[in-house]
Amino acid sequence: MDKLKIIGNGPLEGDISISGAKNAALPILASTLLSPEPVTLRNVPHLRDITTTLDLMGRFGSRFELSDNMSLVADNRDITELRAPYELVKTMRASILFLGPLLTRFGEAEVSLPGGCAIGSRPVNLHIEGLKAMGAHIDIDEGYIKARASRLRGARFVFDVVSVTGTENLMMAAALADGVTVLENAAREPEISDLADCLNAMGARVTGAGSDTVTIRGVDSLHAAEHRVIPDRIESGTFLVAAAATAGRVRIRNTAPQFLDAVLQKLADTGAHLETGSDWIELDMRGRRPRAVGLTTAPYPAFPTDMQAQFVALNAIADGTATVKETIFENRFMHVQELQRMGADIELQGNTAIVRGVDKLHGAPVMATDLRASACLVIAGLAADGETLIDRIYHLDRGYERIEEKLAQLGARIQRVPAAAKAAGGRAVNH
């Protein structure tokens, strides 16, 4: 199992390019199942979750033409399998997104209850209740969601709580339903709007995406289309926080500043100097220690839960004390114990972390527990004295494209360390 070795060595400086958004690309890939004609996608990030998705769609009968520039053509005319098996679904929560497209186009679907990061309960009941409201018959049997419907029909559905994947799944299911579907208390994330743009390019009729009420007027079929995936706002925020934590200066290109208002405001509160353009952001901490900044996570457009861990790392070396409150996932502070191994002064009180900044963190062996916790530990290692060795970085590979290469472009001393092979008799050998 690969590890990352980081030696803290001062400010990050330079320019890097941001990849396509994982959380947009995954539902958009699922949406291509709605069309029997080829769909071309551009700016697709090269990530483990993307590879898993392509493997799963290959099981269904999807065919892909891949290009070196992270473009692909998805051909879903010959779908022969409607079952998403546990061995693939268990590694990626987003697999639930295949339920709606398969059901609405083919009249049935069987999807394993999903896995993914162990950051708390993310129930699929809203997906199931929404599809039932649209006329689906659904059973849960031996760990699988088994759904069927001759044709879904439009319905009004109100989400009890805001659900990003729930909104996406029902949007896709409604695209081929009979009649009009109205989703209320819908998620407003930019990834929702990006999915709607892709669906509409295929001939769907989706309006209101990006607001709390999304309306989908069902059509009989969808057609070929082209779509470019939006930039990854969480990758953007992660590199900006890394620069702030190391008192550095970076410019990120091919990004979308309008998706990062809450994050940029918190970075400004730390004392960072920020400038933005149409597709770039520059952060300059000017060699200063950041100020501690409190925050509370909440659904978009408020502060994203996917940036909470990174700001905990930043606050760990900031001047002052900050309170970080997590309201989305109940188990998303597993990175705190690892930061404490590096000398962080953090106290947990339920869903709140009280972070008292220390002058310096110290390198140590640590273990990643989920995707964003991995990024948190990378930031801590960059800001620490000495060597940090991060284990279980397969989490990191799920959501960050070539992160060690991009950080190295900014001057970081970081390298991937391959796992030692096991020789006969269990003795480790290095090659």
Image (spheres, rainbow, N blue to C red):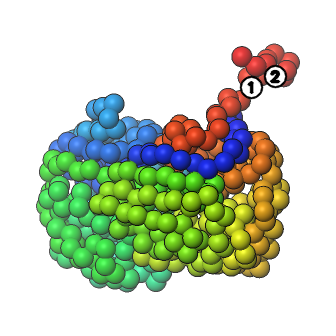
Label 2 residue SS? strand
Q: What residue is rendered at 78% in x and 62% in y?
A: 359
Q: Amino acid at mark 2?
A: Ala
Residue 120 placement (x, y as % from top left): 63, 67
CB contact under 8 Å: marks 1 and 2: yes
Which residue lies under the disc numbered 1?
Answer: 420
Q: Quadrant of the N terminus?
A: top right
Q: Quadrant of the C terminus?
A: top right
Q: Nearer the viewer, residue 366 or 238?
A: 238
Looking at the image, can residue 108 be seen?
Answer: no
Judged left or right of residue 394, residue 299 is left
Judged left or right of residue 87, residue 73 is left
Q: Residues within 10 Å of mark 1 (few under 14, many from 20)?
A: few
Q: CA distance from mark 1 to mark 2?
A: 6 Å
Q: Nearer the viewer, residue 384 or 57?
A: 384
Label 1 residue SS? loop
Q: Amino acid at mark 1?
A: Ala
Which residue lies under the disc numbered 2?
Answer: 428
Q: What residue is rendered at 57% in x and 54% in y?
A: 248
